[in-house]
Image: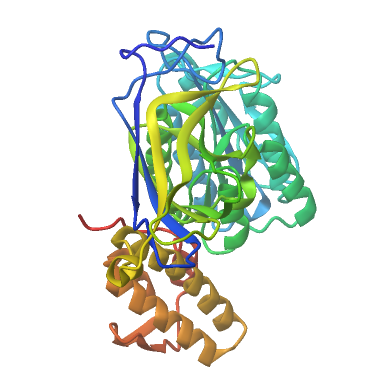
Amino acid sequence: MANFSKSNVPQFSVDVYQNEYLPEGGREVNAIVTVTSTGGGTVGSAVSAPHVYSAGQGPNAAVAIMVDCSGSMDYPPTKMRNARDATAAAIDTLRDGVHFAVIGGTHVAKEVYPGDGRLAVADATTREAAKQALRKLNAGGGTAIGTWLRLADRLLSSAEVAIRHGILLTDGRNEHESPEDLKAALDSCAGRFTCDARGVGTDWEVKEVTGIASALLGTADIVADPAGLAADFTQMMEAAMGKEVADVALRLWTPVGTEIKFVKQVAPTVEELTDRRTEAGPRAGDYPTGSWGDESRDYHVCVEVPAAGLGQEMLAARVSLVIPQADGGSQALPGAQGLVRAVWTDDMAASTSINPQVAHYTGQAELAQVIQQGLDARKAGDIDGATAKLGRAVQLASASGNADTAKLLSKVVDVVDAAAGTVRLKAKVEEADEMTLETRSTKTVRVKK
């Protein structure tokens, strides 16, 4: 077991927001769980807990940068040049001591730097050597992203580090392997490293790129103009360098007769976690949350409790945070616990009131869903269906103050009445605008305090 002291443990906290009151016969309990990590500390002992690390050891991270080198990266030629420049900018952002590698991706995965199945350790010399190696990157060949991910996994797993992270750039569809092959690669890599995925230009498949990021608990985005790659890569690498604790899981314990209906992250993005549960002892299950730096995220937990009489109350769920240990077990993070309660009452006002946090994030999750449904309907030629769904999206974005999503929607529809959700589909929509809306549809805003 790792030894903890207040000086080297990042401060995790758990806050639960809910209306615990249920009417007679009521069984569904909803809660928003806010998890916050502050203090920028480090955790545990590198010897006894390889997933975490102790203060004074320096950066304990490994990063693999996967760059699309398929033939389409030469159209226009500036795309490949911008990708090289962006990768160089990311390498410059690496902290001294971080392990790293660069992978060139086509229908096969190739080690660009350092080679021989190794990772380099970042310092002035290796950063310069890596940037020299980037100059040899040329476009040619197909696209088989699963092979890139498997090579990244092999390289990242060769280092005894706390944080393993990938950055993946593609400009096209994954045409040289089957969807089943890509899924098998993602299943193999899930839980072994996190990965941010970016699509450059407009010839890639949104669901592929967002699916990669989702499976590997990273971020997804579009860089419509290749000139924006360097800034985006720098920002991604800075975020990766800020991660300090890996493999944090949200553990839910529920009493006999209680069933978890769903668990989803709802901020900063909507991410379904229900099916990712791993059993953790009697009536307990763990839901992966990935790596953490100084940040805060919100989760929506919905449980079904046994029916009870008026005046009765019960613990519906206990929420805690755990990290893995070298012996295969797990360790709870101190102080990070919250309780979800259920109380049955005949007070109609109390039992029918919806907690503002729950109401807000229920709307944000619906917003992500109706944008996707609306865009799918638009692609299928269902004008009425697309108008109705995207109109509802405009209404939800307006009501919740999600200005960024509202702005993206306004490039796809003409808004007649935002509050009523009355819109008209634009006759002509730039492909980049539609893809940006789809890619960023799961981004949410937090409840206004």
Q: Position of residue 27 (x, y in %)?
A: 50, 62
| Residue 192 against residue 340 in the figure, above or below | above
Where's residue 244, x and y in %?
Answer: 42, 25
Q: Which colour style is shown?
A: rainbow
Observer-nearest of 67 and 140:
67
User: Residue 165, position in %: x, y?
Assistant: 54, 32
Q: Position of residue 78 (x, y in %)?
A: 49, 51
**Displayed quadrant of residue 105:** top right
Q: Can the viewer see residue 64 in this picture? A: yes
Q: Could you say which is closer to the camera, residue 333 or residue 216?
A: 333
What residue is drawn where x is 43% and y is 18%?
43
Left/right placement of residue 346 relative to residue 438 reads: left
Q: Quadrant of residue 109?
A: top right
Horizontal side of 81 relative to 139 (left or right) equals left
Please tell me which residue is depicted at 69% across the width and 46% down the height of the picture. 145
Query: Image point 29% across, 74% down: which residue?
Result: 398
Quarter of the image where one finds residue 149: top right
| Residue 268 in view here | no
Q: Is residue 256 above or below residue 205?
A: above
Q: Nearer the viewer, residue 111 or 357?
A: 357
User: From the image, which quarter does the N terminus lie in?
Assistant: top right
Frontmost residue, 370 versus 194: 370
Q: Relative to 6, does residue 154 appear above or below in the rendering?
A: below
Outermost residue toward the left in this view: 449
User: Which of the image's four quarters has the C terminus?
Assistant: bottom left
Q: How many marks?
A: 0
